[in-house]
Image (cartoon, rainbow, N blue to C red):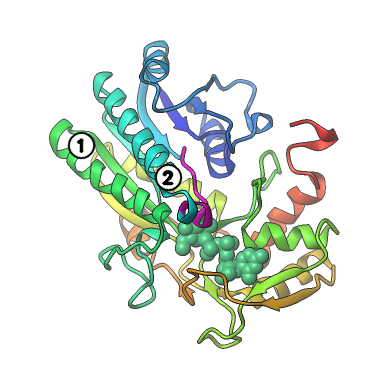
Amino acid sequence: MAILVTGGAGYIGSHAVLGLKRLNKEVVVADNLETGHKESLLKDVPFYNGNLKDAAFLDRIFIEHEIKAVIHFAANSLVGESMENPLKYFDNNVGGTLSLIEAMNRHGVKKIVFSSTAAAYGEPETVPIRETDQTLPTNPYGESKLMVEKVLKWADQAYGIKYAVLRYFNVAGADREGIVGEDHRPETHLIPIILQVALGKRDEIKIFGDDYPTEDGTCIRDYIHVTDLVEAHLLALEHLDTHDSNTFNLGNGSGFSVKEVIDAAREVTGHAIPASVEKRRAGDPAVLIASSDKAKEVLGWAPVYTDMKKIIQTAWDWFEKHPDGYREGGES
Ligand code: UFG
């Protein structure tokens, strides 16, 4: 009995595959390698290169392997791009998931863990954000994830497919042994960009606004280590064996400002990391912090990497060994 990981060549998906293999679970990966990296695939894990909207592609996987559950990461996830090209997000993220659920239903697979996002909430009314708070996405990316959440609810009712929806806050860091890491193209996330400055790949980090209503004026985010995040997926999957569908926030429950993250990176790397202040980036809420109490209470989840320097250290260890990401030596 295997677990199908869609998007298993991506940043979070590759860490999930590694986490499952460390538990000696049987894993199958599906990825179209649009944003994922073939170099992140583990040798002994069957890999299928294709698109989730292709029913025949999915049928082949479900026929060739006895899939008992799906962890679904495959999606486009750039907020800015989603504003410019919303239909791409509805087509890939919603359309791809509809096709995946149809295939699960055809093949009698009844469990799915779904990668959702804090962007499903939009601008929060209060922080920390709870799962019961209003969901009013401010961009098509968040909207596409929320639409899938709604689809899952009705698929559960109609077909008995149980789901765990996991709403991630700011995922960061890399595997402790450096087997996989973070490599986005283009890179838009704060911590990798800061570390590229430390490596001399960029001249400076641009701080997007220091006039927010926070103590130092820069945005506050809730950074969760990718390995802690993966651990929650494994717990959620197990939980579905004996419990109903559910939705959980995943964050550290404490916020760090952009300036605090830069300072922590200066300490960890020993580099100066020049910074300059730019104007605000459109659509950035001032403060996003999760309440992850529910995941802790219901799943027994206990994040290990709650310290910002520890999170950055794991990312830095990987970046130092892979200054050009997965494309070392000019390979793609
Ligand atoms: N930032 C900078 N300079 C940069 C990059 C980022 O100042 O060069 C700031 C941003 O303005 C923001 C913070 O650093 O205040 C974090 O930015 P990221 O781009 O790393 O992350 P976001 O908070 O924008 O986005 C994350 C996920 C999204 C998800 C969103 C939920 O990456 O997928 O949280 O709100 F949708």
Tell me the quarter of the image containing the N terminus. Answer: top left
- Element class at badge 1: helix
The residue shown at (36%, 49%) is 145
Q: Along the horizontal axis of the image, is 133 left or right of 14?
A: left
Residue 294 drawn at (x, y percent):
32, 61
Neighbour tally class for label 2: few under 14, some 14-19, many 20 plus, Cα within 10 Å:
many
Residue 65 drawn at (x, y percent):
41, 15
Tell me the quarter of the image containing the C terminus. Answer: top right
**Which quadrant does ligand 1 occupy?**
bottom right
Task: Give the amino acid at mark 1.
Answer: Ala
Q: Residue 291 versus residue 47: which sits nearer the camera?
A: 47
- Element class at badge 2: helix
Q: Along the horizontal axis of the image, is 25 left or right of 114?
A: right
Neighbour tally class for label 1: few under 14, some 14-19, many 20 plus, Cα within 10 Å:
some
Task: Give the amino acid at mark 2.
Answer: Tyr
Q: Residue 164 versus residue 301: which sits nearer the camera?
A: 164
Give the number of the disc on residue 216. none
Q: Along the horizontal axis of the image, is 126 left or right of 327?
A: left
Q: Is residue 36 above or below residue 126?
A: above
Residue 32 drawn at (x, y percent):
53, 28
Give the number of the disc on residue 155. 1
Q: Which residues are magenta?
A: 74-82
- Reply yes or no: does residue 81 show up in magenta: yes
- Using the rendered image of the protein, determine whether residue 307 is visible from the camera's viewpoint: no
Task: Please name the residue that numbered disc 2 is placed on.
Answer: 89
Q: Which one is earlier in the sequence, the residue at label 2 or at label 1?
A: 2
The residue shown at (70%, 43%) is 177
Q: Along the horizontal axis of the image, is 120 left or right of 151?
A: right
The residue shown at (29%, 63%) is 135
